Amino acid sequence: MASADDVERKYNLITSRLQEVLGADQIKSILAEGRTPKCYWGTAPTGRPHIGYFVPLIKIADFLRAGVEVKILLADVHAFLDNLKAPLDLVAHRTKYYECILRTVFTSLGIPTSKLTFVKGSEYQLSKDYSLDVYKLSTLVTEHDAKKAGAEVVKQVESPLLSGLLYPGLQALDEQYLDVDFQFGGVDQRKIFTFAELYLPRLGYSKRAHLMNPMVPGLMGGKMSSSDPDSKIDFLDPPEVVKRKIRKAFCEEGNVSENGLLAFLEAVLIPVSQLRLERLRGEGGFDVQEGVGLYKPFVADDAPEGTVFTITREKGGGPSHYKSYEELKDDFAAKKIHPGDLKASVRDAIISLLGPIQATFLENEECKQAERLAYPDPNAKPETKKKKKEKVYHPPPPGKGKNVQLPSQTSGNLEP
């Protein structure tokens, strides 16, 4: 049995910064018994992963610090089923790339990947038992419930394919076959989570808890999406591309409700800064020497104790140091922070955050090859080898050619 203080500490770490928790008592019960909670987070390898992925990955860091066993599902079968966004051979390359980039991100944050397990969906989703459970589930689930469950995740079309209707059921079964206590995802997954809570017990399986992150808006407002290149920043975008995208980002003076930069600062930059501050103090459960990268928090060298983020001013006025996101947001709402200064500070922090990731990735030839195969240049012309022209012998016509004898070369006299 664990102490009440230990249970409270771990539970608070597991649930911090989340938008919603379903099944909180289940998690507390596991912690109270002294057992190790097990969870999974899944991602379908379709579009290129972007910095919005930092939101769940940083939360996974909290899980690891709380002693949770984490499985990351690379849902290759789901990726294929989602309205055929990619053929199976391309999904295989993208699955490899996703694992490469996610491991690199964890390493750059100083999170040991030995504490994580990466699982490909096809490793168990094509098994006899899993397939039989899919058939059993199909006898229980109505078309209406399947479509409703996937409404926020599966692309909605006028005539939905059967593959999209299967998607929520597969995600529910993953909880059983990955043998976890809770599933973690964005709040856009809520309908699938409640679907799983309803239908897994009908198959004789346990109901799991579900933890949900808030969704981070894109740079132009709306959802950060791989399909909209201007709404997101790729993990491998070079500094000049980051600068261009941040410069174009929507950031209205005093507007804190529709501001993707502020949302990213709250969900990613400040938590990373806090994590790095804890590491520098020798806290957090990770050795400060583990991993690679620069562990400097996003604060000025002369910032006072407790600062988690510094806003620098490009046109003078001196920096502003903040001990919480709320302080920073209130100053922006009061127009004490100019949008240009917010953009510059967030831009520099993102470039600093991506630097170690890109350096580590570019050292790995296998990962670079996976990226090239996963996302081939659509404008590249296919390489075609020029066919060597074969020489064909054509005999000369009669009386022509180099071996024909001329009259002057013939012997004897010519007749008059």
Image (tube, grey):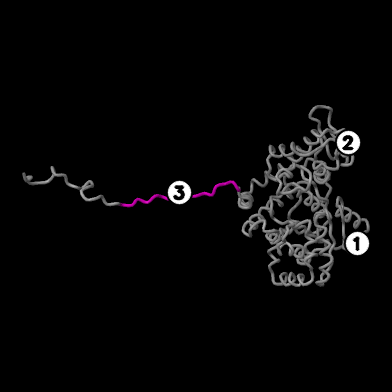
- For the N terminus, the quadrant is bottom right
Q: Position of residue 260 (x, y in %)?
A: 80, 43
Amino acid tagged 1? Asp
Q: Main secondary structure of the magenta part?
A: loop
Q: Earlier in the sequence, mark 3 or mark 2?
A: 2
Does the stretch in magenta take in 386? Answer: yes
In the image, 221 versus 352, the foreground residue is 221
**Of discs 1 and 2, which sits in the foreground?**
2
Q: Which residue is mark 1?
A: 25
Amino acid tagged 3? Lys
Q: CA distance from mark 1 to mark 2?
A: 38 Å
Q: Which residue is mark 3?
A: 386
- For the C terminus, the quadrant is top left
Q: Which residue is mark 2?
A: 331
**Of discs 3 and 2, which sits in the foreground?**
3
Amino acid tagged 2? Asp
Residue 179 seen: no
**Residue plotted at (81% across, 36% down):** 342
Residue 240 seen: yes
33 shown above or below 255: below
Q: CA distance from mark 1 to mark 3?
A: 69 Å
Label 2 Cα neighbours within 10 Å, binned few <14 / some 14-19 / many ≥20: some
Q: CA distance from mark 3 to mark 2?
A: 65 Å
Q: Which residues are magenta?
A: 378-393
Q: Earlier in the sequence, mark 1 or mark 3?
A: 1
Q: Position of residue 114 (x, y in %)?
A: 73, 56
